[in-house]
Amino acid sequence: MGPRFTRPILSFSSLVLLCAPIELAQSPAESAEQPRPAVAKAGGCDEAPQEDALVSTCAPATVAERDDTPMIATVPLAAQPTANIALALPAGTPIRIALDQRTRINHAGELVHGKVVETIYAFDQPVIPAGTVATGNVVDVAAVPGFKRAMAYSNGNFSPYHKYEVTFDTLTLPDGKKLAIATTASVGTADVVHLVSNPDKEQQQKGAAGQAADRAKKEAKGKIQEAKDQVHDSWAKVTAPGKMHRVKEYLLAQSPYRRQYLEPGTRFVADLNAPLNFGETTRSSEQLASIGGTPVSDSTLKARLVAEVSSATASRGTQVAAVLTEPVYSESHQLLLPANTRLIGQVVQAKPARMMHHNGELRVIFERIETPEDVQQAVLQTQKHAEAENAAETAPLPLRPHLRSQAMIGNLEGVEVDRKANMTLDEEGGARTTDSKTRYLSTGLAVLLAAAASHTDSEHGTVDGGGDPGVRTAAGGSGFRLTGAVLGLAVKSTPVSMAFGAYGASMSIYTNFLSRGKDVVLPKDTPMEIGFGAPHAGAAAQPKPQ
């Protein structure tokens, strides 16, 4: 390479070296650790351009291209109209409580302690979970009226039970938070049973596989094995833990003098005297979109009775109202019916109890669902917000069908009542009271004892004018329980034994066969399970004029 080529190359290299520091001083150096800025995809680009790609390779989309791009149908939650819904329990809301400690009924001030047995909802939120501790006290122990005391004395009962009043004033939530409440509690129920109209419905809901497995088990066991299982279950109840306590309670109930206690498991229904507020929740228009929708056919709605219904006072057409105690959701878990939704129905059959021990019958159906007023207002609020934000919408949006009221056909499928009510449900949800089959045996035995008490006891050639001691004791117990049994054994007198036996036999005949039967009574706040059915074609969804 000649000198004339070398000199220009050296000059150009010197110029590059002089310019490099100036360029470095004017622009900061890029760090290898800094992330590279993200490149937004243009309308026609499937992926981000490469480093060495030209700028024109992925140009921004034109207006026409942007118009052709499909838009996402869902609106972000933050951009949707919302409404605030109060989480409050109105006055009169029942709290079902079961005692977990034995309580003496002796004087006012005795502490009562129990737990909530059913979760309480406000709108769609559980605000008082099951297991919440409830405490209160006995506020009043009434004196026994004179007539009741005299009747008890005549039956050998010298310590009749007193009427009492209990209140619960504190709730302790599972997280330790305490709530002060004011309640009015019902009389305690010692033994609650759950009646169902269709015991096979649960089996039907298991599916074909579950039903087939159950049928196979039943067929494998056979009738003889089923009978053995029933005997085994009955014996298991007798030999279960606590049997000595049950025997002791039975003997105490037969004794003339005994103390009055509330045993663990006794159920109370405590109605709130004032509203209980748990704040409020916010729901978007999308979350409220399904309210007022139709539940799945043959689903079960859990509710409570608003007012007492009795076969003695009700007649065909008497209105019946219930309130949902749990929210109802769709198959996609969309809220359809919030808690406190009202179910309106009527009595379709009422047969009062009559003399000669004819028992009462009662059947109700539910025909209409009414959404709570505050929930309706919340849905309307989100609708008005949507109308205000949509300037192109000139006419107001119509109210969704069935939001206020929708038709239904609902039968009673389950109910919780006192065991002493002797109530049953038939397959159509009709309630009726029944009599124990042992009434024939007990009455026949009382008549036999009365007849046997009139005979003298002859044994080994001797005659005992007082009669057989065992017969005297049994005859006395038939008439006056433990007191009569002791007197019948102690007093060796045939006339006395005959009097005790005749009294017991006559009372048994009157009570079991001649007296007035029992009416069907569904008390206020009775827990109910109502089967939802679609209404017939043309059924009115709006309330009927009163």
Image (spheres, rainbow, N blue to C red):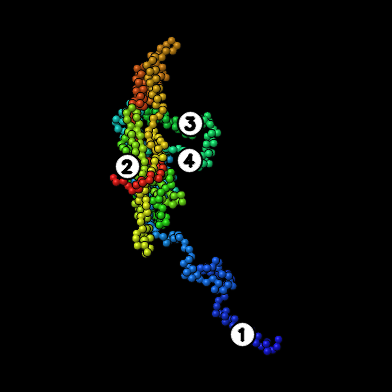
- Residue hosting label 1: 15
Residue found 40% across the figure and 44% down from its top: 533
- Residue hosting label 3: 234
Which of discs 2 and 3 lies nearer the camera? The answer is: 2
Circle on res. 204: 4
Q: Are marks 4 and 3 in contact (CB under 8 Å)?
A: no
Q: Residue type at mark 3?
A: Ser
Q: Residue type at mark 1?
A: Leu
Depth order, front residue of 134/516: 516
Q: In which quarter of the image is residue 199?
A: top left
Q: Answer above or below: position of 188 versus 2.
A: above
Q: Are marks 4 and 2 in contact (CB under 8 Å)?
A: no
| CA–CA distance in space, label 1 to label 2 | 103 Å
Residue farthest toward the bottom in the current orientation of the protein = 4
Judged from the image, the secondary structure of the residue bearing numbered disc 1 is helix
Q: Residue type at mark 4?
A: Gln
- Looking at the image, tell me whether mark 4 or mark 3 is earlier in sequence order: 4
Which of discs 1 and 4 lies nearer the camera? The answer is: 4
Q: Answer above or below: position of 81 versus 495.
A: below
Q: Do the residues labelled 2 and 3 touch (CB within 8 Å)?
A: no
- Residue hosting label 2: 319
